[in-house]
Structures are given as C-alpha cells and as structure tokens.
Amino acid sequence: MDGSGLDVLRMHHPLDGSEAARRRGMDDRALEVVSSVAIVYRVSLYSLLGRRRWQPLAEARQVAMFLLSLERGVTATGKTLDRDHTTVAHAVRRVEEISRYDVTMRARVLAASRMCTKGDGYGSRCEDQRVPSRC
C-alpha cells in the first residue's frame, strides 16, 4: 500500500498477483489456498505474498501459513511462501490462539478452508482439529 492508488485497485482484484506467485514456483494447491485467503480477507494476492507488515495483511498471511501448514508442515510451508519455518510456526500458534476467542478470525479461517476444499477432507480437518469451534 504505497498510496499511489494502484493498491486500491488490487484490493478489488484479489488474484492480480497470481502470475508473480507462479514465477516464484508456487504450485497449484498452494496458489489455491493463498488465493482463497486473499479473497476472504479482500486483499490482493500480490500484497499477501509481499513483505509489508500492515496488520490486516499480516493476519491474512498468518492464516494462509496456518492452512498450508495443515497439509505440508511448517518447513515446506516456509519454503513455499519464502518465509522461515519459525515464522510459519509462530503464525500457526497465533491463529490457533486467536481463533479460540475471536469469532471473526475463526469464521475467516473456516471460510478460506472451505473455499479451497476439494473433497479431500482438508476443510473438515481444519475445522475439527485446529480451529476451536467455540469461544
């Protein structure tokens, strides 16, 4: 968000960064998960994959790390998103902790996981095991 007005356009087109994600070597499944988080949080994929630490972007990025780590583990998720594995582990702990009492975050995590579920049990695994169902 550099204030140029271009980022406002990106906010309305969440998948603008998909070409950049492919150039990074992101596979289809990772792109699907990250894109679903971008849509739920109404941020661009370009911003989500960036380094900016603005709170809404950081939270969305942590949710993406959380969801990917359910399938890949923290080390592989870190490599996929170009982050250190300790950053991913912190994101997983933070999403699990905040989801216990923050209904909005829990709803966003579940919405993103359902968007990227293709009948493989991924969304139900997230819903049942890692994201608390009540406050």
Image: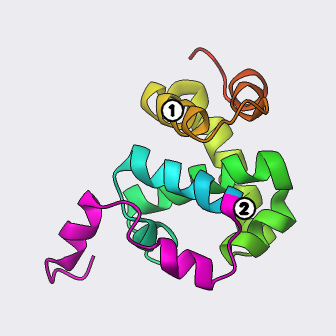
Helix, strand or loop at disc 2? Answer: helix
Which quadrant holds the C terminus? top right
Does residue 50 appear anywhere in the picture? Answer: no
Magenta stretch contains residue 7 = yes
Q: Which residues are magenta?
A: 1-28
Q: Which mark is residue 45?
A: none
Q: Which amino acid is tagged 1?
A: Ala
Residue 98: % across, % down: 57, 37
**Which residue occupies the foreground of this view, 16 or 129?**
16
**Which residue occupies the foreground of this view, 36 or 61?**
36
Residue drawn at (84%, 66%) of the image? 76
Which colour scheme appears in the figure?
rainbow
Helix, strand or loop at disc 1? Answer: helix
Q: Which amino acid is tagged 2?
A: Val
Residue drawn at (61%, 62%) of the image? 31
Alpha carbon distance from label 2 to label 1: 20 Å
Residue at the spot of label 1: 111
**Which residue occupies the foreground of this view, 120 or 63?**
120
Q: Which quarter of the picture shows residue 125?
A: top right
Residue at the spot of label 2: 88
